[in-house]
Image (cartoon, helix red, strand yellow):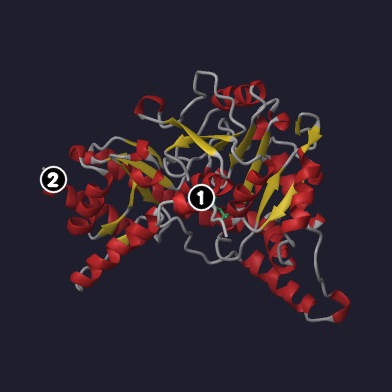
Amino acid sequence: MKLNGGLVSMEEEYVFAQAAQRARRFAAAHPDARLISLGIGDVQGPLCPAATRAMARAVREQGRRRSFHGYGPEQGYQFLRQAISSELTRRGAPVPARDIFISDGAKSDLGGLLDLIAPGGQALLCDPTYPAVRDDCLIRGLRVNTVAGSPSDGFLPMPPPGSLAPDVIYLCSPANPTGAVYTRAQLAAWVDYARQRESLLLFDAAYAPFIGDESLPRSIYEIPGAEECAVELGSFSKLAGFTGTRCGYTVLPAALCCRGVPLQALWRRRQAARFNGVAYVVQRGAAAVLGPNGRRQTERALAVYRANARLLESTLTEAGIPHWGGLHAPYLWLACPQGLSSWGFFDFLLEYGWLVGTPGVGFGPAGEGYFRLSAFGDPDTVELAAERFLHALDYLR
Ligand code: PLP
C-alpha cells in the first residue's frame, strides 16, 4: 500500500487539541484552578424550540409507515432548499433553490469540493486561516500558497500580485480566526481576481449571521459576477446551534463552468458517489430555524454571543491591546502584549488568569504573536473571564 503523502505530512495535532492538552496538564497540576475557556469554537446551545418541535414531529413521522422517509434526495429536500433560497434572496443574494445542495455542515463540503480540482493543483489561502482547509488541501495533494494578513490590512488580505493562477481560492468572512469582515469593494476585487485567473473561489459564510451591519456583504452573491466563479458554504452550526445536529448547505450556481464543463453537474455526480444526504429529521429542524418563530428565537441566542463579543472587545480596548474582529463575529484577534509569542501568551493567561484561549500561530505562520478569544460562552462566565483577563495583565506590567 502506498500512503497518501499529504496526509502523512500533516502536523500530528490540530491547535485545539494541543491547547486542550496543555490546559488539562495545568488543571491536573493545579486542582484548585477553575479554568475558563475562551478558546471554544462551539456554541453553548440549546436548539431553539421551533427546531426541536419540528424535529420531534419529524421523528413521529418516521415512526409511521405512511409518513416514513428512507433515502432522501441527495441534493436535499426541496422544502429546505426553498427556505434557504428565500432567506438568501431576502438578504439581497438571489439564489435559486436548484443551485443549493444540503450538506451535513460546511466542513465536509469544504473538503469535498476539492474533489473538483485535479491533484497537484494550486490553492491560495489566507494566513491566518481556518486550519481544516489547509489540511483538506494537503489531503487532496494540492500545493498551498498563502497571502498573509497583517495589522496594516486589518487582517483582510487582498489578491497577491504576480503570475500565480490558483485553481482554488478559499476566503472566509467573517473570518475565523480574526473576526475580520470583507467589504463589498474588497470582495469585488477577489471576484475579479478569481474570474481573471479562472480560479474557483470557495466562500465560507459560516459566520455570516453575526454580521449586523447592512452595508457589509453576508453572501458572495451580493457581488456581481460571483455566480461565474464562486461557491458559497453556509452552515446552521453557528446560526442555530447545529454543531452537534449537523446541517449546512453549499451554493453552486448553474452558471459556474470550467473550460465549458458545468461544475454543478460535476458536483451532483460527485455527491451521488460519495453522499447519501442529511437526515430528514435534521432537515426539518433546519427549515424551522428559517421560519418566522425560528428566526426570532435564533436571533435572541445570537444576541447573547454578540453581547459577549462586545464585552471582550471593550475589555481589550480598556487594556490598550490592539485587536480586530468581535463586532460582526464571535471571535476577537489580539496582538499578544509585550511581544509574547502566541504560545507564550497562552501559557501566561493559563497561569495568571486561569483562562484558556487559542494561540494565533495555530492558524498559520502569520498568526505568530497573535491570539484568538471566542465569545461562545455564557454571559456570566465571559464577564468573569474579562475580569480575570484584566487582572492577569497586571502581572505583565
Ligand atoms: N468554517 C469555519 C470558518 C469554521 O470555523 C467552522 C467551524 O468552526 C466550519 C466551517 C465548520 O462548520 P460546520 O459545523 O458547518 O461543519
Can residue 34 be seen at all in this image of the molecule? no
Query: Which residue position holds label 1?
Result: 5
For the residue pair 34 and 31, the one nearer the viewer reads as 31
For the residue pair 11 and 245, the one nearer the viewer reads as 11
Total numbered labels? 2
The kind of residue on which mark 2 rests is Leu
Question: Which quadrant: the C terminus?
Answer: top left
Name the residue rendered at 79%, 46% in the picture: 97
Q: Which mark is residue 60?
A: none
The kind of residue on which mark 1 rests is Gly
Q: Label 1 crowding class (10 Å Cα cut-off): few <14, some 14-19, many 20+?
A: few
x and y percentages locating residue 375 in the rendered image: 40, 52
- Circles 2 and 1, Cβ within 8 Å, touching? The answer is no
Name the residue rendered at 55%, 61% in the picture: 243
- Disc nearest the viewer among 2 and 1: 1
Name the residue rendered at 53%, 28% in the picture: 183
Question: Which quadrant: the N terminus?
Answer: bottom right
Q: CA distance from mark 2 to mark 1?
A: 44 Å
Label whose residue precedes the other's in the sequence (2 or 1): 1
Establish whether ligand 1 lies closer than 8 Å to the Cβ of label 1: no
Q: Secondary structure at mark 1?
A: helix
Can residue 354 be seen at all in this image of the molecule? yes
x and y percentages locating residue 283 in the rendered image: 72, 62
Q: Label 2 crowding class (10 Å Cα cut-off): few <14, some 14-19, many 20+?
A: few
Dividing the picture into quadrants, the one containing residue 155 is top left
Q: Which mark is residue 396?
A: 2
